[in-house]
Image: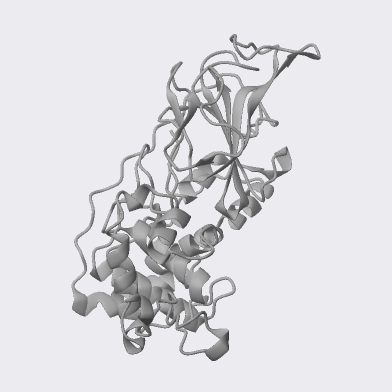
């Protein structure tokens, strides 16, 4: 399944962060940013990556960037994004701008936008009578009876966003928690797992309105510098190991190679690339049609992934990790968070030496039909490989 190929060049470090834009210039700069992002198509979606690959492109796209220090101006005109109207996106812009003014890390903007998508569909809810959930109001369905503020206050989007962020900041290590966990600890919802499904589109909204803010480090309060290998990005992704790329995705020499080989040393910890649920954790190896042990080093003659793990993430993204040294540290059904150790680099299964074979798939499709280039995919998630 995997053999060692030629090394790839490690991505160049980003330039230092640019200075913060003065407030009096922000409306003009925001208008220019919207024009460049929305009208010139600077933000490249995962769907576009697939289209590029199907047309023969290698998928190694150049990113639009990792944002700028232009503070989002809620008084601007906004595009329709996904099912959300310009007015709904304006509410998302208020949430983001409030986070910027409060110097909340960009990861918090994505959490807040995803939460409002679940609670109100980015609509500032007034009194809905019997249709309302108790006395829940505003973008986050905050309840005056639970101490969030008066009805007038919680229906003010800036106030509501500020209260959300204030509560988020009280949660230890919230930046590294799965989005649905962080959101639930703020909201205490009757549907604690409902937030996760909104994470991909919330990330797209933040990326569109900030020029790629989801690709900075999860703990960065300013934009401009991309997350580096080994860091968790604001979109909630990180590289599974820090190692050079030895063999690429579906190359001319290996057209059936549906992932990349990362040349990490034997015993190197392998981390979950994002939060999700383990759907496979087992040995997959055979020789001449008979089962083959994953407790010993494999070879190019052995078939299979060796000890391996599949994780299903929000947005029906799937990641695969192959050739562990020993049985995975997780089991089927486990819920993991980004950066959690799931195993150790080895050479089990079809392998000619220690490395991690890493795959990314769309639509929860475990087959080769669902596989996309991990380099392009992880770049879009702000978690560069190599």
Who is closer to the viewer here, 159 or 105? Answer: 159
Please tell me in which quadrant of the rendered image residue 367 appears: top right
Q: Which x, y percent locates residue 155?
A: 38, 85
**Residue shown at the point (55%, 61%) measured from the top left:** 194
**385 to 193, vertically: above or below:** above
Specify how the rendered protein is coloured: one colour
Who is closer to the viewer here, 58 or 215? Answer: 215
**3 to 121, vertically: above or below:** above
Q: Which x, y percent locates residue 44?
A: 52, 58
Residue 188: in sight, yes or no? yes
Who is closer to the viewer here, 90 or 244? Answer: 90
Residue 205: in sight, yes or no? no
**Residue shown at the point (47%, 60%) measured from the top left:** 203
**Residue shown at the point (20%, 79%) measured from the top left:** 24
**143 to 307, vertically: above or below:** below
Quadrant of the rendering where the N terminus is positioned: top right
Q: Which x, y percent locates residue 221?
A: 26, 58
Please tell me in which quadrant of the rendered image residue 113 appears: bottom left
Q: Give the side of residue 286 with respect to residue 5, left or right.
A: right
Who is closer to the viewer here, 305 or 52? Answer: 305
């Amino acid at each position: 399944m995997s053999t060692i190929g030629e090394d790839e060049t490690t991505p160049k470090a980003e330039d230092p962060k640019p200075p913060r834009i003065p407030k009096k210039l922000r409306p003009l700069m925001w208008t220019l940013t919207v024009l460049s992002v929305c009208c010139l198509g600077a933000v490249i979606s995962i769907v576009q990556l697939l289209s590029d690959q199907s047309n023969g492109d290698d998928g190694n796209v150049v990113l639009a960037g990792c944002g700028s220090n232009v503070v989002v101006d809620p008084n601007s005109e906004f595009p329709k994004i996904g099912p959300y109207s310009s007015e709904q996106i304006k509410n998302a812009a208020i949430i983001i701008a409030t986070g910027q003014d409060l110097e909340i890390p960009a990861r918090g903007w994505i959490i807040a936008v995803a939460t409002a998508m679940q609670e109100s569909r980015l609509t500032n809810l007034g009194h809905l009578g019997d249709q309302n959930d108790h006395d829940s109001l505003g973008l986050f369905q905050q309840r005056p009876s639970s101490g969030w503020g008066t009805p007038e206050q919680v229906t003010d989007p800036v106030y509501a966003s500020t209260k959300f962020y204030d509560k988020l900041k009280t949660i230890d290590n919230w930046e590294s928690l799965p989005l649905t966990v962080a959101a639930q600890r703020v909201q205490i919802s009757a549907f604690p797992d409902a937030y996760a499904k909104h994470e991909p589109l919330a990330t797209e909204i933040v990326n569109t309105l900030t020029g790629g803010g989801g690709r900075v480090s999860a703990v960065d309060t300013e934009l401009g510098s991309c997350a580096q290998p080994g860091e968790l990005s604001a979109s909630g992704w990180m590289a599974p190991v820090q190692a050079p790329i030895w063999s690429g995705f579906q190359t001319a020499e290996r057209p059936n190679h549906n992932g990349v080989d990362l040349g990490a040393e034997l015993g190197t910890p392998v981390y979950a690339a994002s939060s999700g649920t383990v759907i496979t954790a087992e040995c997959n190896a055979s020789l001449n049609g008979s089962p083959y042990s994953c407790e010993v080093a494999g070879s190019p003659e052995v078939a299979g992934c060796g000890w391996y793990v599949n994780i299903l993430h929000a947005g029906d993204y799937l990641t695969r990790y192959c050739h562990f040294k020993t049985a995975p540290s997780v089991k089927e059904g486990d819920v993991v968070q980004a950066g959690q150790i799931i195993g150790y680099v080895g050479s089990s299964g079809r392998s000619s030496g220690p490395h991690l074979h890493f795959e990314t798939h769309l639509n929860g499709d475990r087959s080769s039909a669902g596989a996309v280039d991990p380099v392009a995919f992880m770049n879009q998630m702000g978690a560069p490989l190599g």
